[in-house]
Image (cartoon, rainbow, N blue to C red):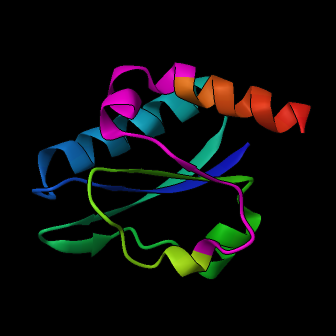
Amino acid sequence: MRIVGITACTAGIAHTYLVKEKLINAAAELGHEIKIETQGSIGNEDILTSNDIEEADVVIISADIEVSGRERFDGKKILEVPMKIAMKSPKNLLSKIEEKLKSE
């Protein structure tokens, strides 16, 4: 599964990067490709390209604030997930997404 996503928290520092790291590690363990853009107080980093988005099977937005650039994902399957869920059980989250995509 190819995944792209955005993480963003109110401060734009700790939780933004913690969720990104947890999702990347879980994806690697499960054999998925993933790229996560961060949006925060220091600006946007690891910005998703149009090619990244085009090739993705799903978009995960794990944010406690409104994210910018959502229009880039028009036509894609988007899953919005609270940061605490992505932080506590990222492998379970990705497994459920994979199951849902297979059943569609």
User: Which residue is at 36% across, 68% downward?
Assistant: 67
36 to the left or right of 63: right
User: Which residue is at 87% across, 33% downward?
Assistant: 102
What span is colored magenta in the figure? 73-92
x and y percentages locating residue 72 in the rendered image: 58, 79
x and y percentages locating residue 52 in the rendered image: 63, 69
Mark count: 0
Does residue 31 show up?
no
User: Which residue is at 44% across, 37% downward?
Assistant: 23
29 to the left or right of 55: left
Judge whether 82 appears above or below 41 on screen. Answer: above
x and y percentages locating residue 80 in the rendered image: 50, 48
Q: Quadrant of residue 100?
A: top right
Which quarter of the rendered picture does the N terminus lie within?
A: top right
x and y percentages locating residue 94 in the rendered image: 59, 30
Q: Is residue 9 magenta?
A: no
Judge whether 75 appears above or below 77 on screen. Answer: below
* 73 vs 14, nearest the viewer: 73
Q: Quadrant of residue 15?
A: top left
Judge whether 76 appears above or below 79 on screen. Answer: below
54 to the left or right of 13: right
Judge whether 40 appears above or below 49 on screen. Answer: above
